[in-house]
Image: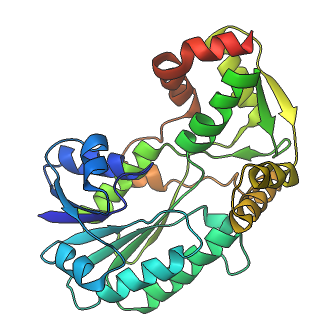
Amino acid sequence: MTVALIGATGTIGPHVVDALLARQVERRVLTRDAARARTVLAPGAEIRQTDITEDEQVAAGCAGARSVLLLTEHSRDMADLQLRIMRALRRLDITIVKISGTSSAIRPDGPYACRQHWEVETILRESGARHVILRPNAFMQTIIGQILLPSVRETGTIPNAIAESGISFVDARDVGECAATALTTDEYTGQTLVLTGSRPVTYAELAALISNRVGRPVDVRDITPADIRQTLVARGTPLWEAEHFEEMYALFRRGESEFVSGDVERITGKAPRNVEAYIGETVRDEVGAGVGEAAG
């Protein structure tokens, strides 16, 4: 069995590759940057230098594969690219496993990137293609690992734009496991699967967990979604993207990402990884000393 992967080198992709490796599945990675793929992925995958905007290259790269992971970078033209890839695959006998976004935001009037996901999902369902849609909630690796922990290192505080609301964070490793199952079985064909942690967690709880881990106080600093937009624009982020994140944090602030689904456990047979474990692993292995110093 061969599985093709578009989008294997980001937050989720390497975990999908690892989960397929554990299943002894042949992995064919289609990527614009083969050199980078070789540095971030476990050895043994077939790496094909591919321009995913070229229909012929996409079709050739996916020919003979059982299924394909459809995951492209967060960009203004994400929907256009994904729809083009889907058209390139239309004549192939292949299952498309699409990674989407936060389930409560996937609607025609949702935040910018989520409106794009809604459009792609809608067309994929109506296309007649075999497919599975995965809707992961906010990633621990992104919000906690790439935003909150660096802030603790630098300032000793956590910026909180969601007030007292929580988020049912999901670990990207669980998303990888679920994607690998969807790519290698027919059990979930035609389904939309919602991937979350087992409970919503507030920023105050995250601050307490990090504080306990580093042994020093970590304070919560209240900000607003509008503050996030302004900060991103000041850093040179394109306006559409800054507004997207403002809309996402407003959604979080309204409690619309507190929902909990049992799909991770249903698919993997295990409870979702929790934030306590993620913070313990991440602070210990990656930023323990830095967090401790900043928090002091």
| 17 sits to left or right of 234 | left
Quadrant of the rendered image containing residue 126: bottom left
- Give the vertical position of 88 relative to 49 (above or below): below
Residue 28 at what x, y percent from top left?
19, 61
Whether residue 94 is visible to the viewer of this picture, yes or no, is no
**Viewer-closest of 97 and 290:** 290
> How many numbered marks, from 0 up?
0
| 27 sits to left or right of 269 | left
Give the residue at x 73% y 14%.
295
Residue 290 at what x, y percent from top left?
60, 15
Residue 219 at what x, y percent from top left?
81, 22
Rendered-image quadrant of the N terminus: bottom left
Give the residue at x 19% y 63%.
48
| 233 sits to left or right of 140 | right
| 121 sits to left or right of 189 | right
- Give the vertical position of 20 relative to 293 (above or below): below
Give the residue at x 23% y 41%.
42
- Colour approach in the figure: rainbow
**Viewer-closest of 241 and 82:** 241
Whether residue 276 is visible to the viewer of this picture, yes or no, is yes
Quadrant of the rendered image containing residue 70: bottom left
Residue 244 at what x, y percent from top left?
71, 64
Rendered-image quadrant of the C terminus: top right
**Viewer-closest of 267 and 9:** 9
Give the residue at x 56% y 55%.
261
